[in-house]
Image: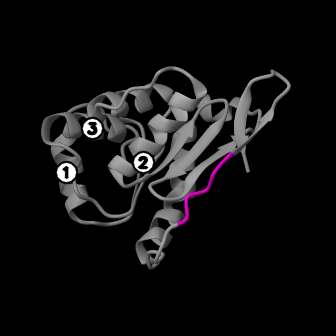
Amino acid sequence: VGPGWGSGRRALLRELFLSKKPMVLDADGITALAELIAAEGVPAHGPLIITPHLGELRRLASALGIADDHTPSGFFAMIEEMAGSLDALLVVKSSLVHIVGPTEGILVYEGSNPSLGVAGSGDVLGASLQPEAVYRSTRKPAAAPMKRRATTTASASSSTWPVW
């Protein structure tokens, strides 16, 4: 939901969330969510997957009042807090793909592929993730969710990233 929407879709998004249907939110839908949060707070919704690029992620963080200290650990703390606050799975698109859920912990995929930065790739990603949103709507919550802890390894660029 969201690609090609344009601006001024906050009311439409609110109505879609009321349906409690599984949803993948991208592009202008993320902008509408940030506006909705800033105006009314985090809305109730059904199973939700949000696929922001870094600019959209910052917009959502700002609407939620969540800060990033611009360090790797601060970034990870920020996206974990956002996933919890939004009760959503985040798939953050950049040169690395960061996947984090409200209880699942963080998974970082280093595919060395910039294709998710290409216009329209979020449309394909959103369609690919829709089955996961439906699955999340049908599964029973775990009795005691386990939070994964990341380990770190040094990459060729000598920065450290959590890997699984």
Image quadrant assignment for residue 112: top right
Residue in the image at 70% along x and 34% along y = 161
Depth check, front residue: 154 or 98: 154
116 or 148: nearer the eye?
148
Q: Which residue is rendered at x = 48% and y = 72% of the image?
A: 144
Q: Position of residue 81 (x, y in %)?
A: 41, 43
**Observer able to see residue 35:** yes
Q: Which residue in the structure is indicated by mark 2? A: 83
Q: Amino acid at mark 2?
A: Ala
State the CA–CA distance, disc 2 to disc 3.
17 Å
The reply to whether dot 3 and dot 1 touch (C-beta < 8 Å) is no
149 in magenta: yes
Q: Look at discs 2 and 3 and give the one toward the viewer.
A: 2
**Percent position of residue 56, x then y:** 41, 30
SS of the residue at dot 2? helix
- Helix, strand or loop under label 3: helix
Q: Earlier in the sequence, mark 1 or mark 2?
A: 1
Identify the residue under disc 3: 32
Badge 3 amino acid: Ala
Can see residue 118? no
Could you tell me the amino acid type at mark 1?
Answer: Arg
Query: Toward which corner of the image does residue 68 lie, by quadrant?
Result: top left
Q: Main secondary structure of the magenta part?
A: loop
x and y, in percent, of residue 5 in the image? 32, 38
For the point 32% across and 64% down, which residue is it?
46
- Residue stretch in magenta: 146-150
Find disc 1 in the rendering and name its residue.
Answer: 14
